[in-house]
């Protein structure tokens, strides 16, 4: 390994657009041919009369039907596999709230490639074999656990599988092992910092932390800045999803100007969720991904439900892999209140601009006498019993939220530590409305 190189895989990371697209069409053709081994895709292709030789250019991808989460549920557990089960060495499953869960199968080669992708992301933001990487995310079925574990090991870092929770132990590990990098969901990082503060631990003085990988849930730029200021580190956005392996799909480079999605692994499309037609660069639409080097379970034109937009296809870091904006949220997470569409992240963005407020908040939707309402509860950073000052603050928050979301929620300022904290992905919205809109 060349410690000094900015690229872990220069043969892929440093490709020109032209070279990348040439690689993509070759890999797409091979993937489509391979999909003929999957009972699901074989039938799909027959139904729409598609033959692998019909895919001659990257634009021909539009001839392929979309794959949805429902397809994964309908073929549960193994109906999508493109290889015999004896070739598979692992599965990850996500429990759906409705219907069957979904299953993603992996061969050893898939796991190797996945580890390579995560290692590449961590290398890109400066991790090297002399780093100590603490993975403070849930293990088990949640892919952020094993995904980062194998990726950091592949890179050669000393890896601490701390898992989520037990903040006092986490802090002890950080200090005793000289942890330089952590991966965790953003809501847990803020919790960790609060416990550090309670324990009198100053991350700048008492730890060697320099890099954080935060992801797995939507978070605002404001939240990221807070995390960076609190811990005195760089915090890089990491995008992943089980269907695409897990982490390692999209990651920010040191420029922090959007997520590089690895185009030697995936074809990225952004489509209008209604018409399913491509949207121009810069416009928000649904992210659709096609895997390019998966063996056990390739997925073609998978509708992720995540909303984002293309920011660019070049970058001062030298990589030409597409850059996407941080996720605005999933289309399923959109709140429709009195006919207005709202994403929780819009509310977070405003709350994080008030230094009087801590990091934890909860949005509750209720029906009160036939009227649907939103209450935003948010924790105060410091104890305050000046009623007049609190009232003024509450009013100002309400005003700023109204400017952003176009309706006025109730705002409740609550003492620090009074809202629930989760060790996995944060639950930000509780919908108690009697009639859903
Ligand atoms: P899972 O497969 O359970 O790990 O969930 C994947 C989903 O988590 C994605 O489809 C996104 O909705 C969300 N997600 C993952 N990473 C991010 C990120 N960096 N920013 C926003 N949402 C994310
Ligand atoms: Zn870059």
Image (spheres, helix red, strand yellow):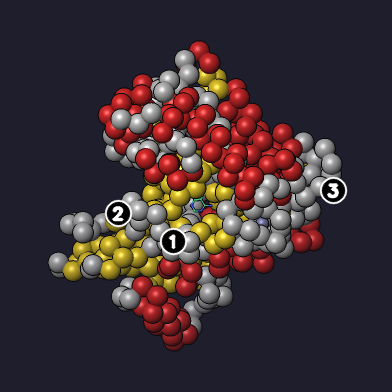
In the rendered image, which residue does mark 1 sit on? 280
> What residue is drawn where x is 66% and y is 60%?
315
For marks 3 and 2, the one nearer the N-term is 3
Q: Is residue 59 visible?
A: yes
Tell me residue 392's x, y (percent). Answer: 43, 85
For marks 3 and 1, the one nearer the N-term is 3
Task: Tell me where residue 2 sits by quadrant.
Answer: top right
Tell me residue 407's x, y (percent). Answer: 31, 75
Quadrant where the N terminus is found in the figure: top right
CB within 8 Å, label 2 to label 1: no
**Closer to the camera in the image, 53 or 80:** 53
Q: Identify the disc placed on residue 275.
A: 2
> What residue is drawn where x is 72% and y is 34%?
154
Q: Is residue 382 above or below residue 148?
A: below
Is 190 positioned to the left or the right of 273 in the image? right
In the rendered image, which residue does mark 3 sit on? 4
Foreground label between 3 and 2: 2
CA gap between label 3 and label 2 equals 47 Å
For marks 2 and 1, the one nearer the N-term is 2
CB within 8 Å, label 3 to label 1: no
CA gap between label 3 and label 1 equals 37 Å
Q: Is residue 114 above or below residue 275?
A: above
Q: Secondary structure at mark 1?
A: loop
Crowd class of label 2 (few under 14; some 14 to 19; many from 20; radius 10 Å): few
CA gap between label 2 and label 1 equals 14 Å
**Closer to the camera in the image, 57 or 200:** 57
Is disc 2's CB within 8 Å of ligand 1?
Answer: no
Task: Tell me where residue 74 sits by quadrant.
Answer: top left
CB within 8 Å, label 3 to label 2: no
> What residue is drawn where x is 43% and y is 53%?
270
């Amino acid at each position: 390994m060349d410690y000094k190189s900015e690229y872990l895989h220069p043969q892929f990371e440093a490709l020109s657009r032209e070279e990348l697209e040439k690689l993509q069409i070759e890999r797409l053709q091979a993937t489509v041919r391979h999909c003929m081994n999957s009972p699901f895709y074989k039938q799909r292709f027959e139904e729409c009369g598609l033959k692998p030789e019909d895919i001659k250019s990257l634009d021909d991808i539009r001839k392929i039907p979309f794959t949805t989460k429902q397809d994964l549920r309908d073929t549960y557990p193994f109906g999508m596999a493109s290889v015999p089960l004896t070739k598979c060495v692992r599965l990850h499953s996500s429990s759906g709230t409705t219907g069957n869960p979904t299953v993603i199968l992996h061969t050893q080669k898939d796991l190797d490639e996945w580890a390579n992708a995560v290692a590449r992301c961590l290398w890109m933001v400066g991790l090297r074999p002399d780093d100590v990487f603490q993975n403070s995310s849930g293990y088990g079925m949640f892919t952020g656990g094993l995904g980062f574990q194998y990726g950091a090991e592949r890179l050669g870092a000393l890896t601490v599988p701390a898992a989520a929770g037990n903040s006092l132990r986490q802090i002890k590990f950080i200090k005793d092992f000289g942890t330089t990098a952590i991966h965790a969901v953003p809501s847990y990082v803020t919790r960790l910092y609060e416990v550090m503060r309670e324990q009198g631990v100053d991350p700048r003085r008492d730890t060697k932390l320099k890099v954080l990988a935060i992801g797995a849930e939507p978070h605002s730029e404001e939240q990221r800045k807070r995390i960076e200021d609190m811990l005195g580190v760089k915090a890089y956005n990491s995008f992943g999803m089980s269907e695409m392996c897990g982490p390692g799909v999209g990651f920010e480079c040191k420029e922090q100007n959007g997520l590089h999605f690895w185009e030697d692994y995936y074809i990225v499309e952004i489509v209008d969720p209604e018409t399913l037609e491509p949207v121009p660069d810069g416009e928000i639409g649904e992210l659709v991904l096609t895997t390019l080097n998966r063996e056990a379970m390739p997925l073609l034109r998978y509708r992720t439900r995540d909303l984002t937009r293309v920011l660019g296809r070049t970058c001062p870091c030298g990589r030409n892999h597409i850059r996407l904006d941080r996720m605005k949220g999933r289309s399923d997470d959109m709140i429709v209140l009195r006919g207005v569409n709202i994403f929780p992240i819009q509310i977070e963005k405003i709350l994080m601009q008030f230094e009087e407020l801590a990091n934890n908040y909860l949005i509750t939707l209720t029906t009160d006498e036939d009227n649907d309402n939103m209450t935003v509860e948010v924790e105060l950073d410091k104890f305050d019993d000046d009623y007049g000052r609190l009232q003024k603050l509450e009013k100002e928050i309400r005003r700023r939220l109204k400017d952003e979301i176009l309706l006025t929620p109730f705002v409740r300022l609550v003492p620090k530590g009074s809202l629930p904290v989760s060790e996995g992905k944060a639950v930000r919205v509780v919908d108690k409305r009697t009639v859903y809109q």
